[in-house]
Amino acid sequence: MAIPITLQQCSKTFADGTRALQPLDLTIAASETIVLLGPSGCGKTTTLRIIAGLESPDAGGKVLFDRSDVTAVPIEKRNVGMVFQSYALFPNMTVEGNIEYGLRVRGMAAADRTARVKEMLAMMRIEPLARRRIDQLSGGQRQRVALARAIAPRPRVLLLDEPLTALDAKLREDLRLEIDRLLRSLGITSVYVTHDQAEAMALGDRIAVMANGRIAQIGTPHDIYFTPADAFVADFIGTMNRVRGVVVGGRLRFPGGHVALANGSAAEEVMFRPEDLRVVDESSAQFRGKVVSAFFLGDHTRLVIDAGSDAMLVARIQDRSRFQPGEVVHCAVDPQAVLVLPPASL
Amino acid sequence: MPRRSPNFWLLLAFTLSVCAFLIVPVWMSMLAGVTQNYFVGWRGGLTLDWVSKVWTDYRHTVFRSIQIALACLACTLVLGVPLAYVLARKSNALSRAIEELLVMPVAIPGLATALALIVTFGSFGELRTSWVFILIGHVLFTLPFMVRSVLAVLASIDLRTLEEGARSLGASFGQRFFGIVLPNCRAGIVAGSLMVVTLSLGEFNMTLLLHTPLTPTLPVGLADAYASLRIEVGSAYTLVFFVIIIPLLIALQWASRPRDPHAVN
């Protein structure tokens, strides 16, 4: 049932001449969930809309569903399910009516429709809302209805365009779990667009980080986090510390001390994650810095340290030490955790 | 019962006097239509003779006006709703210009529009002497009211995304237009219809020039009655007009009430 999707050399130039998408190749495996992640204007929504059939790629671009070319097939005939940020539920219909709509326009028999609607209501746990009007629903309920409506006709592909952006934080997390459960149980090929990296990490089998109309890196959440391809990806996913200095004897020296470099590296800028910055005894310290602020967040403490480099360093301390602003701390970073990255290639 | 402040009574008195200012002339006019002699007043006795005289002499103008109003409604629905849809979907300089141009017949005096119509189409066979000629004028005049009120509703809903949602579910253009677009701009269509029917029924300026002695409408007949007959006849005519238009307004208001979507399914 699940099908692979292939984009070949898909670019998009809008009528006003803006190049929203550089020629892009992307292969999405059957039943894979791919997340298109990036800041606004990076081309992620355009990519999704090209897959959906709401935009057509510039001449030369091709969209394949299961090896058949659907570039010229309009969205009505592509059999995709789509979930919108603004829900796009039909205000003139009840919850049931909305879920049933896709089945009705396809001419499904009434008895089958009723059964399918019931199944969808149960799957999204919204049975009590069946007869409600759309304007009587909360945001979270609306998005559940939108999901139910999108999957009711058993589409070949599920496309989600920032489905959780309009919801508040707590609800977003609940619904994220719900969507994860749904995507796993359906085993449907899905494309999920978001600018929220936590959503991307939680839901994506793979993440495509996009910037300026290109894919900057594509890989598993693990790859993207631990081996970012360039400084843009590293900065966009999680928090990164950057240190600039001069290389002296295999070490990067900067005013607060040094960071050990992996063998042979001559990089003048390195990056490392806040959780890789350790506060250590003076004897094993590589550099020292002054605590600018310390936020105790329950499960960890977030330190902002001034070590004399261009930017403040952020540390994520898991133990129960207490820190005071102004205090001098001694720090070390494992050479394996030090990343040397090319600058953003775009 | 809570004590009302002096302000409340002041406002109530003001509201009632404004209402009286508006309603009393209407009431006086309607009363004049059933008095035996206007100059003696209601003490001189009440009669329905004037009303029945109006009904015998002018009933054809009433039917013609209703016919024109309904035909005008049909035309503005068929032309105006799709036009509003296209204008809502395409917002460029051209569509804005069309929107502005549509209002011209409202801004220009009706007499001028009527003259232009006569100069242009007056020699087209039977058209000049047909009620359809009046209809053309009324459609020109009322179309912007239909387009504007549908457009206002379409602008308030995210039409593009709603349609994209319907398309993703496999709906063809026809299924989308009749199943999604029309039901969601129902409030605008009803409000527009209300305007179109009442404006067409009461239209005088343009109709004065467009009608022929064989095709007078209700307002033209009313002017005729006031100008050439007793004031009681004119007033009785007003009474007939009210009797027709008020149930019509109530019916249209009733049709525009928010509908229970449960009834739809």
Image (spheres, rainbow, N blue to C red):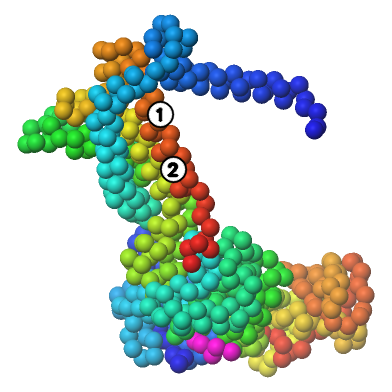
Sequence-first disc among 2 and 1? 1
Nearest the eye: A265 or A301: A301
Within 10 Å of disc 2 (Cα), the crowding (few <14, some 14-19, many 20+) is: few
Q: Position of residue A31 (x, y in %)?
A: 51, 90
Judge from the rendering whether residue A50 lies leftward or rightward of residue A239; answer left or right.
left
Residue at image location 77% in from the left, 25% down from the top: B5
Residue at image location 82% in from the left, 73% down from the top: A302
| Residue designated by label 1 | B242
Circle 2/circle 1 CB separation < 8 Å:
no
Quadrant of residue B165 in the image? Answer: bottom left
Looking at the rendered image, the quarter that the N terminus of chain B falls into is top right
- State the CA–CA distance, disc 2 to disc 1: 14 Å
Residue at image location 39% in from the left, 57% down from the top: B182
Residue at image location 61% in from the left, 79% down from the top: A124
Above or below residue B81? Residue B214 is above
| Residue designated by label 2 | B251
Find out whether residue A247 is within the magenta segment: no
Q: Amino acid at mark 1?
A: Phe
Does the rendering let one see residue A269?
Answer: no
Q: Position of residue B186 (x, y in %)?
A: 43, 52
Above or below residue A92? Residue A116 is below
Find out whether residue A186 is within the magenta segment: yes
Nearest the eye: A273 or A256: A273
Judge from the rendering whether residue A221 lies leftward or rightward of residue A345; answer left or right.
right
Q: Range of the magenta residues?
A: A185-189
Q: Secondary structure at mark 2?
A: helix
